[in-house]
Image (cartoon, rainbow, N blue to C red):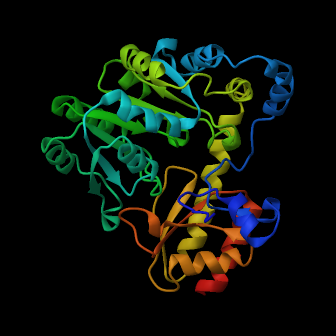
Amino acid sequence: MKETFDHGGTVFAVARRLGVSPDNILDFSASINPLGPPVGVRGALAAAFDRLVHYPDSGAVELRDALARRHNLLPENICVANGSTELIYLVPRLVGGGRGLIVAPPFSEYAKSLTRAGWEIDYLDLDPDQGFALSLEILDRRLARGCDLLFLANPGNPTGALIPGNDVAEILRLCRSRGTFLVLDEAFIDFREEESATSLVAQGGGAVVLRSMTKFYAIPGLRLGYAVGSGEVIARLAASREPWSVNTLAQAAGLACLEDWEYPARTLDLVAAERKRLASGIAALPGLTVYPSSANYLLVRIDAGPSAPELAARLLAERVLIRDCSSFRGLSDRFFRVAVRGAEENMRLLDLLGKVFA
C-alpha cells in the first residue's frame, strides 16, 4: 500500500520507510509544543485506566464544563470532538448548501471535507509578496458571488499570519450579511489567545470556531478538539457527531491540561524566545526568506538553492523531517515549514540548513 504524506507529523510512516525507530527522527514537520504534555497528564491517564471497562462519557460533560470555565462561556456553547478534524468534516453536514470558499494556502482537510460532502470549492489565494494579508474588500466581493460556507484559519496554517480580532469581527459581519457560514479554525490561536473569536461567535449564529488541544498541549496521539458557537449551532453540531468519538483517556488528559495553570505561560515564553532565535538564524542564511509568525512554526521561502522537496530529502538523510509545502494550494516547491522546537533541536536544524545554503 502506497503511503501518502499530505500532512506534517508523518513520523511513523517515514520511520518505516527508513527502517528506523520514530525516536531516531527529529520531527520539525509537526507543530507540537516542545515542552511535551503537561506533567499531570501521565498521572491522569493512569488514574483513568480502570474506567476503560465503561463506555466514554459521550457528551464529555466534565471536559466541556472545564472548557466553558476557561473561556468564560456556557457549557452549551461548546462541543468536544475527536480532534478539530472531526469537526471539519461535520460542518458541511451541519450547514447544508453546496458552494464553499477556502482562504489559501489552507489545511488540506478543508477541501477534502467539502469534496466528500459533494460541494463545489472556490479559493481565495493570498499573495506571499503581501505577507499573506487578507483584504476584507476582496473577501466581500468573493462572498457576494454566492457562498454557503467559508473556511478560514487564524493564525494561517502554514503561514503563521495573524488576522487581528477587529478584522475577524468584520469578517463575521460580512459573512452574516452575505448568508455565509463562517468556519474559523483557531487550532493555533492559543499562542495569541487575546485575538480569539470564541466569545464573539458564541453571541450569535452563522459561525463556529474550531479549537485544538493537541498542538498546544502536545497530545496529538490522543485526538482532542472542540467547537465554540451559539447554543443552537452547537446543539446541531453535537447531534451530528458519531457516538463515543472522544475516548475516556482523551477526556482525562484534556482535564489535566486545563488544570495546569503554569503550563501556558511557560509555553508562551519558550516558543516566543525560540521562534525569534530560529527565525533570525534562518533569515541570516543566504537564499532564505522567513515570514512573520504568530504560532509555533515558521514558513520559509527558498529564493536561491535547492527546491523544498530536494531540501527535505537532504535533511531526511540526516534523519531530520521538515514540511515540504509544495502540496499546499497557493504555494510552490520553493516553500517549506518548520516547527519551533527546543533550543538544542533548533540549533541542529540551523546547522544543517547552514551546510546547505552557506
Is the residue 3 above or below the residue 221 in the image? below
| Res 154 quadrant in image | top left
Q: Where is residue 170 in the image (x, y as percent from the top left)?
A: 25, 35
Q: Which residue is drawn at 57% across and 72% down?
A: 282
Is the residue 227 above or below the residue 300 in the image? above
Q: Is residue 337 left or right of residue 48?
A: left
Q: Residue at x 41, y 72 (%)?
A: 332
The quarter in which the N terminus is drawn is bottom right
**Tag count:** 0
Q: Which residue is drawn at 75% across and 65% down?
A: 16
Q: Position of residue 269 (x, y in %)?
A: 65, 45
Front residue of 55/188: it is 55
Front residue of 244/67: it is 244
Q: Is residue 229 visible?
A: yes
Is the residue 53 above or below the residue 325 in the image? above
Q: Position of residue 38 (x, y in %)?
A: 76, 36
Q: Is residue 194 visible?
A: no
Q: Is residue 135 left or right of residue 286?
A: left
